[in-house]
Amino acid sequence: MARLSTTRRVHAAVLRLAEADGPDSLTMEGIAAEAGVGKQTLYRSWPGITALIFDALLAESAAQADGAGQPPGGVVELLDETAREMSTPPREVLLRWLAGRIQTDEDAAAQYRTRLLEPQRETVHTFLRGRGVDDVERVAEALLAPVFYRWLMRDAPMTRDELLAIVERTLA
């Protein structure tokens, strides 16, 4: 694996290039040039673009979580933060690219499930368990589905009142 300083430069290069030119323009050659590393450095640490995107997204999420302070105090805040995180450049364009990719690429779908979805789902489950929810799987899906639907359909984000109504109906 690449040194930490190299990994950070590579992740930053992925995010910069994706925001500037879109994920379809990402190449190992372009990322290596932007990060100031050799292509072999990339290939020794990542098997391809999809793995690089997942790593860059995970690193960005970890960095934001480290600087965020306390987690949201309620379910509405958790949903609002989820929607905001999914809609923030360059994360949004990368997540949309991955959403399309996982429909036809089983390896990308497996990476998505194990590297992004399952850890995020466990975070939501832990959050709900801490608030006394018994059937965390069902409740998490019922809470997150409207947020993801709006995001996938590129509809207006949920307002705080809409999120509150969803939470109240779901937890009732």
Image (cartoon, rainbow, N blue to C red):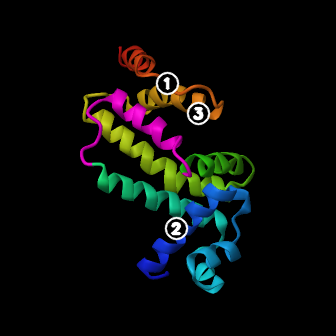
Give the spatial CA distance, label 1 vs label 3. 9 Å
Q: Report which residue position mark 3 lands on.
A: 151
| Residue furthest front in the image | 20
Mark 1: amino acid:
Met
98 or 157, which lies in front?
157
Instruction: Note whether 105 is above or below 153 in the view shown.
Output: below
SS state under label 3: helix
Question: Is 55 one of the magenta-colored residues?
Answer: no
Give the spatial CA distance, label 2 vs label 1. 30 Å
Q: Which mark is residue 50?
A: none
Residue at 64% across, 78% down: 33
Give the spatial CA distance, label 3 vs label 2. 24 Å
Q: Report which residue position mark 2 lands on.
A: 11
Q: Position of residue 10 (x, y in %)?
A: 54, 72
Instruction: Note whether 82 is above or below 16 in the view shown.
Output: above
Q: Position of residue 139 (x, y in %)?
A: 42, 27
Q: Position of residue 91 (x, y in %)?
A: 54, 50
Q: Report which residue position mark 1 lands on.
A: 158
Residue at 64% across, 52% down: 109
**Numbered range of the magenta stretch:** 69-90
Mark 2: amino acid:
His
SS state under label 1: loop
The quarter of the picture where residue 148 lies is top right
The quarter of the picture where residue 54 lies is bottom right
